[in-house]
């Protein structure tokens, strides 16, 4: 308990850092994932090819390699002087967007084809059909896997600590370097991660109950 009390400021900064990385990169992943999922089911071949390439490349690239690209190539080629925080959320957001895309696409595929055909028959465009008819129905199917994706994102945020970002796993390293018992430090760090992941699970369970999602 003394480890937590004596170093509460360090724990607090790490906790806030992990929550911030998770929330902001999750927003990026959700927006990009929805857009790319729309490309994946688009009737336009170039858009489908783009969506397929996006998912294939990002899902099959190790996240650590994406961090190296974001920190050592992106600033040199496009955006010099970007903060480590921005680079970290871009790496996490882009990587996670590929998983969000596939979850959304799977949900779209569960919607009966007749729903889209009926929408088109009354004059709705592809985007209107997707936004007004298909996605609202697909949401019920997408919620359970989306919870797992965001929990995985929380754990993946630990990599950002190796790239000049303040987060929980980085706090663990600092405390270990100070000579504290590593098992006690890991206990408090693990508890902090559990608080975040249980909060995500609780939020999605509430959404599932609200929408009557069967498990």
Image (cartoon, grey):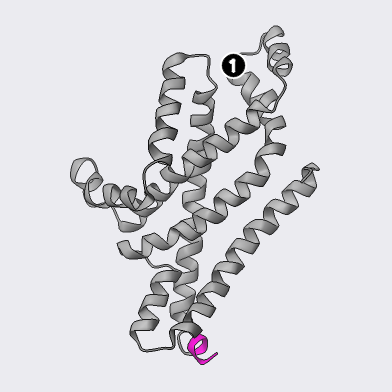
Q: Looking at the picture, how far across and down is residue 102, in whole percent?
A: 54, 35
Locate residue 110: give its quadrant: top right
Residue at point 51%, 38% (across, down) = 31
Q: Looking at the picture, how far across and down is residue 23, in whole percent?
A: 52, 54
Q: How many marks?
A: 1
Q: Of all residues shown, which one is farthest toward the bottom?
A: 2
Against 24, residue 102 (above or below) is above
Find the magenta span and give its range.
Answer: 1-5
Which one is nearer the viewer's eye here, 26 or 41?
41
Which one is nearer the viewer's eye here, 11 or 110?
110
Q: Of all residues shown, which one is farthest toward the left?
A: 76
Against 129, residue 10 (above or below) is below
Q: Is residue 33 left or right of residue 89?
A: right
Q: Looking at the picture, how far across and down is residue 127, in whole percent?
A: 58, 20
Magenta stretch: residue 2 in it? yes
Q: Main secondary structure of the magenta part?
A: helix
Which one is nearer the viewer's eye here, 136 or 62?
62
Residue at point 39%, 82% (across, down) = 175
Q: Quadrant of the N terminus?
A: bottom right
Against 174, residue 53 (above or below) is above
Residue at point 48%, 37% (across, down) = 32
Against 99, residue 14 (above or below) is below
Q: Is residue 171 left or right of residue 140?
A: left
Residue at point 63%, 57% (across, down) = 200
Disc 1 is placed on an element classified as: helix
- For label 1, the residue is 126
Question: Badge 1: how crowded within 10 Å, few (<14), some, or many (20+)?
Answer: some
Q: Of all residues shown, which one is farthest toward the front?
A: 60
């Amino acid at each position: 308990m003394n480890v937590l009390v004596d170093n509460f400021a360090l724990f607090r900064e790490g906790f806030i850092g992990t929550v911030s990385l998770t929330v902001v990169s999750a927003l990026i992943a959700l927006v990009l994932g929805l857009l790319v999922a729309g490309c994946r089911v688009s009737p336009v071949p170039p858009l489908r090819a783009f969506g397929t390439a996006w998912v294939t490349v990002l899902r099959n690239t190790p996240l650590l390699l994406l961090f190296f690209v974001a920190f050592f190539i992106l600033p040199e080629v496009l955006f010099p002087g970007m903060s480590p925080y921005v680079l970290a959320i871009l790496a996490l957001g882009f990587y996670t967007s590929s998983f969000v895309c596939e979850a959304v696409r799977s949900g779209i595929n569960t919607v009966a084809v007749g729903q889209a055909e009926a929408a088109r028959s009354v004059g709705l465009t592809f985007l209107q059909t997707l936004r007004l008819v298909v996605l609202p129905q697909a949401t019920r199917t997408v919620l359970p896997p989306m919870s797992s994706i965001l929990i995985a994102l929380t754990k993946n945020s630990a990599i950002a600590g190796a790239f000049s970002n303040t987060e929980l796993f980085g706090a663990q390293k600092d405390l270990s370097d100070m000579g504290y018992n590593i098992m006690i430090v890991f206990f408090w760090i693990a508890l902090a991660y559990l608080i975040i992941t249980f909060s995500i699970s609780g939020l999605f369970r509430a959404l599932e109950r609200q929408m009557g999602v069967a498990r």
